Amino acid sequence: GDEMTGQVVLPYGIPVLEQLLQFLSDLIKPKGKEDTIVFGLSLINLVLETAGTGLGAHPSLVSVLQGDLSKYLLQNSETNELQVLSLTLRVVFNLFNSIKDHLKVQLEIFFTSVHMRIMDSPSCSNEQKELALESLLEFCREPALMLDLYINYDCDVHCTNLFEVLCTALAQTTQGETLLAECYFFVNVHDAGKQNKKRYFLAAEKFHSEPKNWIAYSQQLGLLPNPITAESVAAFFHQTPGLNKTSIGDYLGDGPKEDKPFHEAVRNAYVAMFDFRNAPLDEALRMCLAKFRLPGEAQKIDRLMEAFAKEYFHQIQTEEHPFAHEDCAFILSFSIIMLNTDLHSDQIQKKMTLDEFVRNNRGINGGQDLPREYLELLYNNIKANQIKMQTDISDMQVVTTVDRYSAQWDGILKRQENVVGASFTSNASILKLRAGRHEREMFALIVDSTTESILNAFERTCDEMTMQKALDGITNCIKIAVYFNMLPELNKLLAALAAYVVEFAHSVLNGDKHSKSGKLRERTRRLAERQAAHRQTMPSTLSQHPASFWDSLSYWWGEEEGEADTDFPLVSAALREAVSRCGQGLLEREMWLKFCRKLHSRSIEALLKALLHRKTGKSETEGDMVQENAMLALEWATNVILVNLHRFGALWPLMHTYVAQVLTDPSKPLLVERVRAWIRSYLVETSFLPCRFVYMTRTLASSSIPEIDFPVWSCTSM
């Protein structure tokens, strides 16, 4: 044995592991037998789970995982065999856990073309959709995933809005397209990356729809300078994602230069942005044709190839090259394009030979021949590696067949050179980070569709666990809105709950049996306090008049005067509807006051302000109605103070200011008389906490209020 001979057994090393991964990748080719594919996927899962993040430290291993393995996983996702699909989705998740920093483009494709394609496809079975949702649930259990998706994809101009698309797809799966189509939201985005992405998207749309006006529009967006320059337009074509490559080629090839000198300048500036140094002519052509597509018009092609050859010849002057003049590079570029079409077109049966290619290019170098070795190198490069157009991510979203997946995979890998490198957060680090600006924007993006889907699930279910989860979801949304001080979103959430309070008001407040009343009772307790706070003593005019009691009470939801109408208009309307439908006497005065005593001090102060904030009537009849409303408000305000005497020092100044203003206003005789009676009733006839009344009578007397006699108590009488 090894111990007897003294030999040390060394591991085989990375090259063997690379060959093993390549072998396992070949096992899962979609055209293989099902048992072989299942066996290969199982072994790959075992390798990924065992090796873990250590795989990312070896570029050769990452190359295999990024290339063939990811491509075959994408192809296998179209299978109807549930076992193959389940194992494929599991491998995708293990890849994410192992080398996610190296799979930015692949993960984007997996999410959009596997998970969401399965969920949206009417041809996929419910079992397939369930597997896709379970896989997404497994991803979502990663604490940092959603934040990382937003930062790495939604804020990258070259990537899909993956976080937004994913959340929208989940909401659509929950509630259906009809309800989702009615969900409208607008996000005021502050993040620079997200702003740039939105502006580039709008500019690209304008470039396609209005070719004559897109420059002025892009200047308005701040993407192009004013006055415009050829260099800025060329840079715009280089860096703006989503531009149609054919449209770029048409614009760059437009002419002639005598009629359109600006297009000529843009064309020269565009090709000058490429770095052709140390690049063979065929590689330089690949670089250009990956950015735009040659137009169909021969004259436009001539202009583009002429600009390319001129720039290429200029950049290689410091190197050893075979060209005597830029015309030679121009002619040879055309010859290479024709060779590429000849060798790789299925419609051409007889392919061009090397000798024919050499013969076609005789005498093009200033009357001399180019070295045969140089032409042979170009021929072999084109034969082995076709010049292809890079595939945009928008083209991949409609792919549905295995053949098209395979054909476009090289373009997907090429995109890795353009996107910003991924930066994923570890699970340990995310727990130490405080929620910041990104999380606020993320919540604003999804709150409407999320709320709609949760409430839709709550309304349709009879399962108690589902009800509980739905209410937990709404509660979490409210907590997030409060944390970020997002009043419009909080308004919508509370209004959504208020709608259910209306429906189940009798059950919630009277304790009647109802399938959902028990769950709603705890979640909507404070909402119920606000929506059924009045008894049958309230006149009917108060709910109809524009200066009604409800208009003032809605102020309770704000903190400053006049804030309620702008911050919580939906909630106010919902509460009015709740009271009108719930009827009279749903909540007795004693219960309401008991709830009132438990509210936060700032809420009590806001409620008192709402009760005492009165509007002035424009006519005599309207003025009397306002005074009647104010009398009722005064009674309720007094009740609020009486049950909150422990907050007397904070509440009484509000009442004192109001009473002083009323008693000095002769235009409201009914209200003045009621206030006088109120003072005698509560401050004279009621004998409680005399020391506090000493304070009240002194402050009232200092306001020079006429014709009211105040008895004097001593604080020692307590």
Image (cartoon, rainbow, N blue to C red):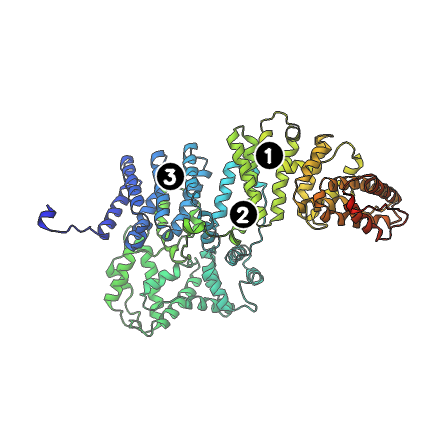
Q: Is residue 361 visible?
A: yes
Query: SS for tag 1?
Result: helix
Query: SS for tag 2?
Result: helix
Tell me the residue at 88%/48% (across/down). Answer: 667
519 left or right of 606 in image: left
Tell me the residue at 27%/56% (across/down). Answer: 384
**Identity of the amino acid at label 2?**
Phe
- Report how many numbered discs are placed on residues in the image: 3
**Identity of the amino acid at label 1?**
Glu
Q: Earlier in the sequence, mark 3 or mark 2?
A: 3
Q: Position of residue 542 (x, y in %)?
A: 78, 38
Rounded to the nearest angstrom, the CA distance separating label 1 from label 2 is 25 Å
**Residue at the right extreme, as displayed:** 707
Local packing at callout 1 (Cα closer than 10 Å; few below 14, some 14-19, many 20+) is few
**Identity of the amino acid at label 3?**
Glu
Q: Position of residue 353 (x, y in %)?
A: 25, 57
Rounded to the nearest angstrom, the CA distance separating label 3 from label 2 is 33 Å
Tell me the residue at 61%/45% (across/down). Answer: 490
Where does label 2 land, which residue?
A: 443
Q: Nearer the viewer, residue 265 or 21?
A: 21
